[in-house]
Image (cartoon, helix red, strand yellow):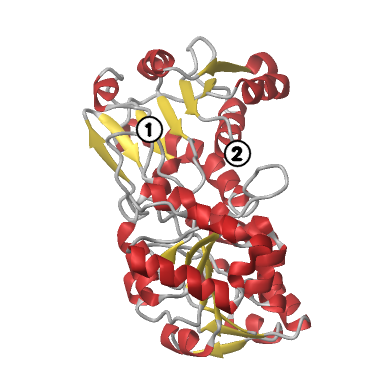
Amino acid sequence: MRIGVPKEIKNHEYRVGLVPSSVRELRHHGHDIFIEKDTGLGIGVSNEDYERSGAIILPDAASIFETAEMIVKVKEPQPQECALLREDHILFAYLHLAPDPEQAKNLMHAKCVAIAYETVTDNTGGLPLLSPMSEVAGRMSIHVGATALEKFNGGSGVLLGGVPGVKPSHVLVLGGGVVGTNAARMAMGLEAHVTIIDKSLTRLRQLDTQFGSSLDTIYATVEAIEYYSEKADLIIGAVLLPGAAAPKLISKTMLKKMRPGSVIVDVAIDQGGCFETSHPTTHDSPTYVVDDIIHYCVTNMPGAVARTSSFAFNNATLPFVVALADKGYKKALQEDPHLLNGLNVAHGHITHEAVARALGEVSIHLLLRLFENLSFFQESPWDRVLSLQSDKGIPFFF
């Protein structure tokens, strides 16, 4: 297969879809890899490094999209990249379609097969391709939050860990998943007072066993969130509903009750954010203020530590890239239901239930039951499904 890696063009995004070691592995499997010129410079990888690994360097993104059958990216395609997508393209990237109907519309218009890293699953119910970046974002959230708390940056002027004779700051983490756990770990390492709120008692028990009395674990209710948000110096939004828009846990009313100069870091901003007052920001202008509360809502936080993120990201994604390239997308999805969960758009239709619901699409996934063993990938039943969808004027997804 011809695999192309364009240079990321989102604001201050330096991560790369394939690092040289991944290129070499794919070349070992007999695939041709095309890298846009200077793609790796942001992580200290030269064009020559890619060429030594077996890649072919092309001058621009248009050449990559024209040559490749599969496009491997990090962040969602920007509008000018969507315009380069074709019906015969496989796109493998973080998409986060739920809060982004315009991108969804562009991908549907392109009629490509778009597979989202963030909805690929594993045997434990986890999200293996999202986890590495969640780990990075969780750890970074404390770093950026602590910086935003500095008086020079508009914060309340408190040190997370305090000093002898002065109490530490209070960090509230909403969500006890990968992001929340890593955020709590970093905050406790700085000797802050940390509280995690989560709706899963099982997860709260696990966190209690892992961290003991160093961490307060609280069951999620509106009252609990309101009470602890008023006490917090720093709140980390770390909730996730795979494929769906994030729930709004901190309302405008709650925000007004927080102490002036407090900081919220919304790691869930890729899925729309979990604070009612959140909107996406960039590394160029990462924060804004609402009711004297500093908001940090950068949508590609791990891009700031691009080298670490790129290698961690490739460690997780490479086996799936190899499977798609070796088998083709139809066979790869047929054989791996976890990879199938990553399919978000195909042939002009939304194909993931949570994404469809978030975008206000109509679910007719029960049609899947008409075709056993994923036989809808065969030409005849697939065509019949699309024909039925067209007749009904509603999208098909599975």
Q: Which mark is residue 276?
A: none
Q: Quadrant of residue 148?
A: top left
Return the x and y of residue 396 as percentages of the image width and height. 44, 61
Q: Residue furthest left?
A: 291
Query: From the viewer's perspective, is the residue at label 2 or at label 1 nearer?
Result: 2
Residue depicted at x 56% and y 40%: 139
Residue depicted at x 60% and y 44%: 135
The three-letter code of the residue at mark 1 reads Ile
Residue depicted at x 37% and y 32%: 264
Q: Which of 293/163 is in front?
A: 293
- Is the residue 152 above or below the residue 85 in the image? above
Q: How dense is the environment of label 1, judged by Cα within 10 Å: few (below 14), some, or many (20 and up)? A: many
- Pointer 2 or 1: first along the chain: 2
Q: According to the image, label 2 marks what residue?
A: 178
Q: Residue furthest right?
A: 28
Element on which disc 2 rests: helix
Q: Give the left or right position of residue 373, taking residue 158 as reference.
A: right
Q: Which of 147/95 is in front?
A: 95
Can residue 17 be seen in the rendering of this structure? yes
Return the x and y of residue 196 as percentages of the image width and height. 54, 23
Return the x and y of residue 13 as percentages of the image width and height. 44, 63
Q: Quadrant of the N terminus?
A: bottom right
Element on which disc 1 rests: strand
- Is the residue 40 above or below the residue 68 in the image? above
Q: Give the left or right position of residue 209, taking residue 310 as reference.
A: right
Q: Which mark is residue 264?
A: 1
Return the x and y of residue 192 as percentages of the image width and height. 53, 22
The three-letter code of the residue at mark 2 reads Val
